[in-house]
Amino acid sequence: MTSVVNIAAYKFVTLDRLPELRQRLLDAAVQAQLKGTILLAEEGINLFLAGSADGIDGFLRLLRADASFADLEVKFSRSASVPFRKMLVKIKREIIRMNHPAIRPEAGRAPGVDAHTLARWLEQGVDDAGRPVVMLDTRNAFEVDEGTFKNAIDWRIERFTQFPAAVQAHRAELEGKTVVSFCTGGIRCEKAAIYMAEAGIEHVYQLDGGILKYFEETGGPGYQGNCFVFDERIALDPALAPSA
């Protein structure tokens, strides 16, 4: 049985009165009998939740009733059990830490490429303009070790705060190519793609929705292995089933 619904979502949007929002979301999640983690910061929201279909639906209706989250895009998967032990809502300085406060995705994101377009590019080996396509994994090394796109660039970073320095050290290998940054659910590559574009690297894209959306929409062509996730499932295969 795979009766438990798992969701992952994020949005970069300016938020205020965070303690009040934290309590409101915690109360709603507990009432819906959900478990997982919600991260809140002035720059936005990042969440990973699991529970019954009705519980998830009810929570999303409440969340999207807030204008700040009305267009929140969600990635879904299922599991036989709830892969979280607690329900936590935390206030952070950043929803994904990069230590570059000038990088504000809400103010304008780098171009995105959808899952089906990327699958076509990977099959062709070039984008629609004929440029070679390179996949850039923005995740930490231990996540990459669970699986990644074939021939993806992996700089062996240990934490996302090391990404900007890695770009500066390796930027020559990106010149003249279409660079598609990717991560688990899209949040890291939002900041990564903006940083690269502002660093003067041309033809930078981010994979919309990350690996999980790519699995959901295409089944994962060109991806080798599984996708590490930060819960008790450990990793998901391209069918979005726990790999263990």
Image: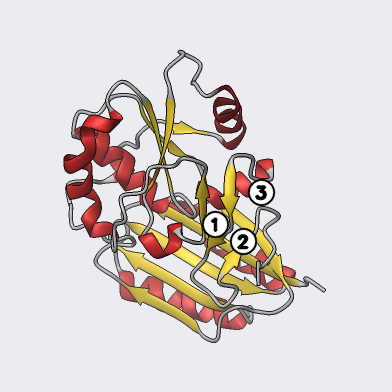
Q: Residues within 10 Å of mark 1 (few under 14, many from 20)?
A: few
**Residue at figure coordinates x 60%, y 73% from the top left:** 233
Q: Between marks 2 and 1, how big is the CA–CA gap?
A: 5 Å
Q: 195 above or below 157? A: above
Q: Amino acid at mark 3?
A: Glu
> Is the Cβ of the residue at disc 3 closer than 8 Å to that at disc 1?
no
Q: Which residue is mark 2?
A: 61
Q: Amino acid at mark 1?
A: Arg
* Label 1 secondary element: helix
Q: 203 above or below 80? A: above
Residue 137 drawn at (x, y percent): 40, 47
Q: Amino acid at mark 2?
A: Arg
The single residue placed furthest to the right in the displayed view is: 1
Mark 3 and mark 1 lie on one chain; the one further toward the N terminus is 1
Q: Residues within 10 Å of mark 3 (few under 14, many from 20)?
A: some
Residue 58 occupies quadrant = bottom right
Q: Which residue is mark 1?
A: 64
**Residue at figure coordinates x 57%, y 66% from the top left:** 235
Mark 2 and mark 3 lie on one chain; the one further toward the N terminus is 2
For residue 7, side relative to residue 22 (left or right): right
**Residue at figure coordinates x 52%, y 24% from the top left:** 125
Quadrant into which the C terminus falls: bottom right
Residue 133 drawn at (x, y percent): 44, 27
Q: Which residue is mark 3?
A: 216
Question: Which is in the foreground here, disc 2 or disc 3?
Answer: 3
> Is the Cβ of the residue at disc 2 closer than 8 Å to that at disc 1?
yes
Total labels drawn = 3
